[in-house]
Amino acid sequence: MLHARTLLLMLPTALAFLALPTIAGRHETGFLNRFVRVNGTEYRYQVYVPSNWSKKQKWPVILFLHGAGERGDDGLVQTEIGIGTAIRRHQDRFPAIVVMPQCREKVWWLDASMEAQALKALDDARKEFKGDPARVYLTGLSMGGYATWDLGAKATGRFAALVPICGGVVLPSHVTGREPGMPPTEATGDPYAATARSIGKTPVWAFHGSDDPAVPVTESRSLAEALKAAGGNVRYTEYPGVGHHSWENAYAEPDLMPWLLAQRLGK
C-alpha cells in the first residue's frame, strides 16, 4: 500500500518532466517586445507573431511604419493605431510576421537614423521568425505613408509590394517647422514621376480619404497616375467623405491581405 501511495504522489512530478520538452519547444506568439541597437542607440519595437507560428515553414513579413502621433521611445504606442488595431480585431486575416518599429520624437521616418533602425528591426525579426525574403512587404500611414513611398523608391528589390496610406512625397504647405527627415514642402521638377520611375514594377496598393485635412488627397492621386503613366503595377482606393484616418478603412479591407501576400519578389 505504501509503495502504491508513493507512486501516486510521484506521478504529477513525472508528468511535469514529460511535458518539459513540449513546453520548451513552444515559441512566443502575439505582440512581442524586442529591441535593436544602431550606432550605439537602443530602439524598442514590437513584433506580431501569429499563434500558429512554426519554424517548419517560411513566413511572410510586413514592416509597418506608424504616423507622427505615435512617435516616442516606449516601443508600444505604435501598435495602438493602424495595423496593430486591425490585427487585434481580425487575427485570422494576418498570417504574417508584422514588424512595428517606433520613430523618435521630433524626427521623421525619412531621417537616415530612423530608416536604419526600422530596417535593422525588419532584418532581425525576419531572421528570428524564419521570414521569407521573397515575401517582405512595406506599409505605413500618414508620416509612415510618406516613408513607404520614399523607402519603396529607394530600396527597390527589397520589398515585394507597398501599401502606402494617406501619404505622399511633398508636404502640404500648411505644415510648419522643420524636423530631421521631413520631405520638402516644395519640390523641383516632377517628384511624382521620379518616385514612380524608381518604384518601377513593384506592386502598389495606395489608399486615401477624399476629405483628408492633413495630407492632401492629390498626393496619392498624383502618385497613382504617375505609376500608371510609367507602366507600374498600381491599385488606388479613395474613400469618399473619409478624413485622415483612412487607415481604418484600408486595413479592414478583406481583399488587402490576400492581395499583399500573393505578391512575391521574382514572380
Image (cartoon, helix red, strand yellow):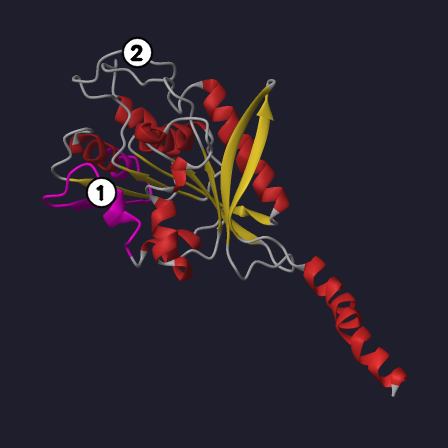
Query: 262 above or below 143?
Result: below
- Image coordinates of residue 14 in percent, x first then y, are 80, 71
Q: Residue furthest bottom?
A: 1
Q: CA distance from mark 1 to mark 2?
A: 25 Å
Q: Residues within 10 Å of mark 2 (few under 14, many from 20)?
A: few
Q: Quadrant of residue 166?
A: top left
Task: Give residue 8's quadrant in the image.
Answer: bottom right
Q: Give the residue displayed 43% in from the left and 51% down from the top.
A: 263
The residue lying at 38 percent from left, 33 percent from top is: 199
Observer able to see residue 245: yes
Residue 212, magenta (yes or no): no
Q: Which residue is mark 2?
A: 178
Q: Secondary structure at mark 2?
A: loop
Q: Is residue 243 magenta?
A: yes
Pick the front one: 191 or 257: 257
Give whichever of 85, 168 is nearer the camera: 85
Question: Mark 1 vs mark 2: which is more N-terminal?
Answer: 2
Per the image, label 1 sits on a secondary structure element best described as loop
Q: Please count the marks in the image.
A: 2
Tell me which amino acid carries mark 1: Ser
Give the residue at the far right of this rendering.
3
Residue at image mark 1 = 246
Name the residue nearer the viewer: 156 or 29.
29
Which residue is painted at 38% across and 46% down in the image? 84
Q: Is residue 266 visible?
A: no
- Residue 174 lies, with reference to residue 195, above or below; the image says above
Q: Hey, what amino acid is under mark 2?
A: Arg
The disc placed on residue 215 is none
Q: Position of residue 158 (x, y in %)?
A: 50, 37
Residue 153: x and y in percent read: 40, 30
- Work out which residue is located at the far top of the displayed protein and give it: 178
Range drawn in magenta:
226-253
